[in-house]
Image (cartoon, rainbow, N blue to C red):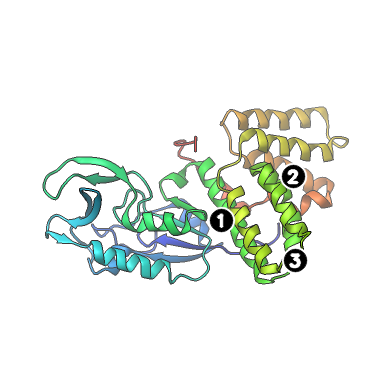
């Protein structure tokens, strides 16, 4: 793909944008840094926005009965209402957005693994969950591309996030045209990508695009958008992605040498064994596309679901099973 629609991504401001953590630090992120050229970021620090300042005494989530509260132990201050009010005002006042990258384990922004304490004093952590801002993001935007910066260091999680957020951005742009023709083109260009992710939902999307009952375009777009988010909800199974890659290889079967085929099949084995990311066998197919020019395949987003230079980000090697 020669051009990618720029996603709009809400990001925790401390991740490369401002030294606004409780201790005055800023968190480096190779992913966020690489994305700056390709996305429109909306940085936010909920804790600063409710007046806690920088640096500040840490806050924590405490559980009182069935209710969670946001508590600042050093000052004995309850900031639950302030955080809840800001969160709702900010999130429900957002313009079009395609995804979120939030601070790992933060009592405000965390999406999971945030410690929850059993009381206000020196009580031990009694569980884990999402932060106050993070849990409302999951409630309101959970079917969008939502991740924390820690998990994005893993190549499989990152590939899924990037694929999803750029696909949602492309659809957002397509639906602005309010045209069935544009939607048909979108479905056609994303066919192999959707096939790799969820063939059952892909076929349902095809029926929606066919629109045999001639429903109004806004209804069709709303229905299609919900199905698209459902199709992209989980990273593709390796077997499904390999089936698509083998299907694509068939377009070049008469042009390739035996050694080229074996090299490609070897990359599929490594991908199946989680030794390399999906982008490696896709990169081999892209080299064949440049060499042999297959028009149908060249227009498929599966072969470049997001900008090519984002493939180069290194991998932590952790958390590959998602």
Residue under circle 3?
Answer: 180
Q: Is residue 175 left or right of residue 127?
A: right
Q: Answer whether residue 297 is visible to the viewer in this image.
A: yes
Disc number lying in front (2 or 3) = 3
Q: Is residue 91 left or right of residue 125?
A: right
Which residue is found at the position 71% from the left and 68% from the top? 216
Ranked by sequence position, the earlier of labels 2 and 3 is 3
Q: Is residue 225 above or below residue 178?
A: above
Q: Secondary structure at mark 2?
A: helix
Marked residue nearer the N-terminal end (1 or 2):
1
Q: CA distance from mark 1 to mark 2?
A: 25 Å
Q: What residue sits 62% from the left and 40% below the top?
A: 278
290, 151: nearer the viewer: 151
Q: Position of residue 306 (x, y in %)?
A: 62, 54
* Mark 1 lies on residue: 165
CA distance separating discs 1 and 3: 22 Å
User: Answer yes or no: do the residues labelled 2 and 3 have beta carbons within 8 Å?
Assistant: no
Q: Is residue 31 above or below residue 185?
A: above
The image shows residue 22 at horizontal and vertical percentages of 24, 58
Residue carrying label 2: 287
């Amino acid at each position: 793909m020669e051009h990618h629609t720029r996603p709009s991504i809400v990001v925790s401001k401390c991740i490369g944008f401002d030294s606004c953590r409780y201790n005055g630090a800023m968190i480096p992120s190779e992913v966020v840094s690489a994305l700056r050229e390709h996305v429109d970021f909306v940085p936010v620090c909920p804790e600063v926005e409710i007046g806690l300042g920088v640096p500040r005494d840490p806050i924590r989530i405490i559980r009182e009965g069935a209710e969670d509260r946001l508590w600042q132990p050093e000052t004995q201050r309850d900031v639950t209402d302030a955080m809840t009010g800001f969160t709702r005002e900010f999130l429900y006042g957002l313009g079009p957005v395609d995804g979120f990258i939030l601070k790992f384990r933060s009592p405000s922004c965390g999406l999971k693994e945030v410690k929850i304490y059993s009381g206000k004093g020196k009580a031990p952590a009694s569980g884990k969950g999402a932060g106050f801002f993070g849990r409302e993001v999951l409630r309101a935007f959970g079917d969008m591309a939502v991740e924390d910066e820690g998990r994005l260091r893993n190549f499989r999680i990152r590939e899924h996030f990037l694929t999803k957020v750029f696909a949602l951005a492309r659809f957002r742009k397509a639906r602005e045209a309010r045209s069935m023709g544009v939607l048909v083109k979108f479905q056609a260009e994303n066919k192999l990508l959707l096939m790799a992710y969820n063939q059952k939902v892909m076929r349902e999307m095809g029926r929606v695009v066919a629109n045999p009952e001639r429903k109004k375009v806004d209804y069709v777009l709303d229905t299609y958008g919900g199905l698209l988010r459902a199709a992209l909800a989980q990273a593709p199974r390796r077997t499904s992605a390999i089936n698509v890659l083998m299907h694509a290889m068939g377009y070049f079967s008469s042009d390739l040498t035996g050694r080229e085929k074996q090299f490609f099949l070897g990359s599929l084995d490594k991908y199946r064994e989680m030794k390399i990311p999906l982008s490696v066998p896709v990169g081999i197919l892209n080299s064949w596309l440049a060499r042999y020019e297959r028009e149908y395949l060249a227009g498929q987003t599966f072969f470049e679901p997001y900008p090519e230079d984002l493939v180069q980000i290194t991998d932590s090697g952790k958390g590959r099973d998602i």
